[in-house]
Amino acid sequence: MKNYIGISRDHSGSMRNISKAAMNDYNLNIEAIKKESLKYEIDTIVSVVKCGVGGRATVEREVVNSSVSFLKPISEYIADGNATPLFDSVGELINQFKNVPDYDDEKVSFLITVITDGQENSSKKWSGRELAKEIQELQGTDRWTFTFRVPYGQKRHLQSFGIPAGNILEWEQTEKGMRESSEKTTEAFGTYYINRTAGLKSSRSFYADVADVPIAEIKNTMVDVSKEVSFLKVNPNADGMQIRDFIEKTTRKPYDRGTVFYQLTKSVKLQDYKVIAILDKLTGAVYSGFAARELLGLPRVGEVTFKPGNQGKYEVFVQSTSVNRKVLKNTKVMIWDYLKIK
């Protein structure tokens, strides 16, 4: 099992005000990749290109197919380019990887991740149409993953290239925005590696964000359990109460372990056996099934720390198998009598 990871960094002049945060972002990502590859014993080769360098706004190679274990943190991030040849930077990484000696090995996967504070405006080698066609063909092999961090409002444009919504993260072009996107990206690398150990070769939900998943996809991949569930509101006076005590006090019935679901609002550790349900707040419909984990970018096996992203019109509920989990005020608890763990 082997990973090739390509990183495209934006070095155009607009990045100058957040160059320190961009430097830290790169160093954190490399450290995360290094940590996960060592933890799961997956050979990882990294290539890095700088997008939009200097007056000619060129694409320059910084690292070419190096073992991640040999990579060092960078100590400066010069942002002096006059434009952003984004398509050319992605194409450069594609070409590098298509020429590696084990390219046809079915155990080898490829991930290209892009960070930019702008948009394509100066590529000479790759047009948008050519790149979109190439990306779609590579994704069709189920061995390639493309992820993008872009300014707000650009997700839809990238989706027209065939990039899954779950692989695009919109971020605010500030130091705070960069730090937040860094945290989400390092967490996403952790999930990516867990999924690789489970046999998955690509990801369509690199960033755990269910907000943009079309309701049609949810309906087609999961089961409508709306008639089988009921909800309880957690009022402020019940904040911090153990889930068993809350259920028994509210329903005046015994707590049946495994039939109660808590609303996902903060980082939690999720095990692979936990059932997940998704509530459409607009219609009140509730869906569940194995596909719920994939829509959230969760691995099929193992435990992972999950930080929920923007859930939009949806609410996510996770099965509780404990008696002492604390319920939180202003959230909901879902009861599903058809799921029981004895």
Image: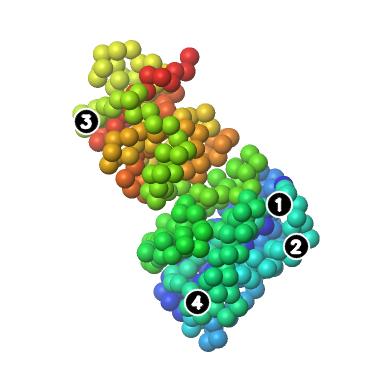
Q: In the rendered structure, which amino acid carries the disc numbered 1?
A: Val
**In terms of depth relative to the viewer, which is nearer, 188 or 101?**
101
Q: In the rendered structure, which amino acid carries the disc numbered 3?
A: Asn
Residue 84 badge? 4
Q: Check if mark 1's residue and mark 2's residue have beta carbons within 8 Å.
A: yes
Vertical arrangement, residue 188 with respect to residue 248, above or below: below
> Going from the N terminus, do you reach mark 4 or mark 1 first?
4
> Going from the N terminus, do you reach mark 3 or mark 4 first?
4
Determine which residue is flagged by label 3.
235
* Label 3, residues with CA under 10 Å away: few <14, some 14-19, many ≥20: few
Disc 3 to disc 1, C-alpha distance:
50 Å
Q: Which quadrant of the view contains residue 215? A: top left
Disc 2 to disc 3, C-alpha distance:
58 Å
Would residue 61 be visible to someone looking at this image?
Answer: yes
Disc 1 to disc 2, C-alpha distance:
11 Å
Extreme residue toward the right, this view: 101
Whole-percent x, y for residue 85 in the image: 53, 76
For the residues carrying marks 3 and 4, which lies nearer the camera in this image? Answer: 4
Residue 100 badge? 2
